[in-house]
Amino acid sequence: MKTFDVVIIGGGMTGLALAAALQSSGLSIAIIESNPPKGVSLEQFSPRVSALNLASSQWLDELGAWQGITQQRVAPYDAMYVWERDSFAKIEFNTQGLGVPQLGHIVENELIRQALWERVAQQKTHEILLRTESSSVVRAVSSADVQNPVDFVTALPRSLGVTDRNAILTLEDGQMLSAKLVVGADGANSWVRKQADIPLTFRDYGHSALVCHVQTEQPHTHCARQVFSSDGVLAFLPLAQENYCSIVWSLPPEQADYLLHCETSEFNKKLTVAFDHKLGLCQLQSKRYTFKLTARYARNFAQNRIALIGDAAHTIHPLAGLGVNLGFQDAKMLAQAILANEQLGVDFGEYRYLRHYERNRKVEAAKMLLVMQGLKDLFSGDHPLKKWVRGLGLSATDKIGLVKEQLIKQALGL
């Protein structure tokens, strides 16, 4: 049986960020991931993107991953414009008076993951286990004086048991791992959460998100744009090429399904109209994908020997693009808790030492869920009085400098 201090299940963005934050700690770490990054094409944008706020990009820089991302491609944005169709409701944000060059960056998820993976894997003291095509496990990198290895295990976990002193993982290939702490960074359908019998509160938003990349007739001018309508939300996120945007279109499932399968010319027409022709004619440049939108909130973010981060703990509506930032803050705070308790010489895997992390992150996730639900409820419906109230509220906020500044700082993560 191999023994580790921390086993992270899930080698996505949040799981790898946690591993990167712990890599100089002297702790032994295993990452269980069945789908290692395969690299990102320099000719074609990958389909899923995230809007990284200032706090997230600064943390990625501290972890040593930001340079690897910017060397590939990244799209900074210095303005945001939000409006409602067929209404006078609108609000604009920019960097004026904030002392920062950007509001954030639009980055492909696979680029973030690739940079974090390389950062964690490049240390000479790390031991990396990868599965070959024959499913056997081989040692890809080793060192005779390994003191704090980070193992990548691509066999999937089969069972998880917890005792007072450790957690025991059995993998599908028969390996057994022991750890002080198992971290579930394995997404919305978290295996760790299910194994730990942690209840989940969820709410169906009644929408599906359609994502793809489009080319616009006019340049995006590094501005993120979002339009609300009575039946959905459409966001245009600027990409590294000045006439390319990634879109996230939140719609009732039947409409999203129609737009997923309709002819390209029909899709281009409907998208251009839905976006109020803000950037001229829009033309599809990638495959279209849809996924169901559900709010999730785990009753516990931690218990003895187990902690949840990212989508394993919570998922929110993508209308503000803040999900990954919330996950990164989970990873950052959990890393801080582990390191602080390790320095104190206490067992960081015991629930009593994880409670501060849990309390803080549950509050932050709950606030974000409430804000997202409030925005969705506010902009749903087409009643004239409701549209008037929305228009009055947004227009007033747009003119009150101090309120706008606070909203921007919240979005920046400051």
Image: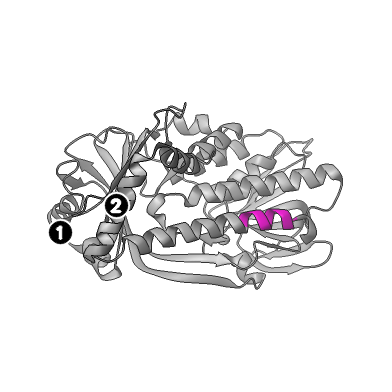
The N terminus lies in quadrant: bottom right
Does residue 309 appear in the picture of this structure? no
**Which amino acid type is marked by label 1?**
Glu
What residue does disc 1 label? 263
Q: Position of residue 299 (x, y in %)?
A: 62, 68
Give the structural element (helix, strand or loop) at label 1: loop
What residue does disc 2 label? 392
Residue at image coords 34%, 40%? 399
The C terminus lies in quadrant: top right
Quarter assignment of residue 156 = bottom right
Residue in the foreground of this view, choosing between 233 and 111:
233
| Cα distance between the residues tagged 1 and 2 | 39 Å
Residue at image coords 79%, 52%? 348
Residue in the foreground of this view, choosing between 320 and 24:
320
**Most prominent secondary structure in the magenta stretch?**
helix
Quarter assignment of residue 267 = bottom left
Does residue 278 appear in the picture of this structure? yes
Label 1 crowding class (10 Å Cα cut-off): few <14, some 14-19, many 20+? few
- Quick check: 394 above or below 144? below
Image position of 338 (left or right of 277)? right
Residue in the foreground of this view, choosing between 349 and 359:
359
Which scheme is used to colour this image of the protein?
Answer: one colour
Query: What residue range appears in magenta?
Result: 354-361
**Which amino acid type is marked by label 2?**
Leu
Q: Position of residue 375 (x, y in %)?
A: 39, 58
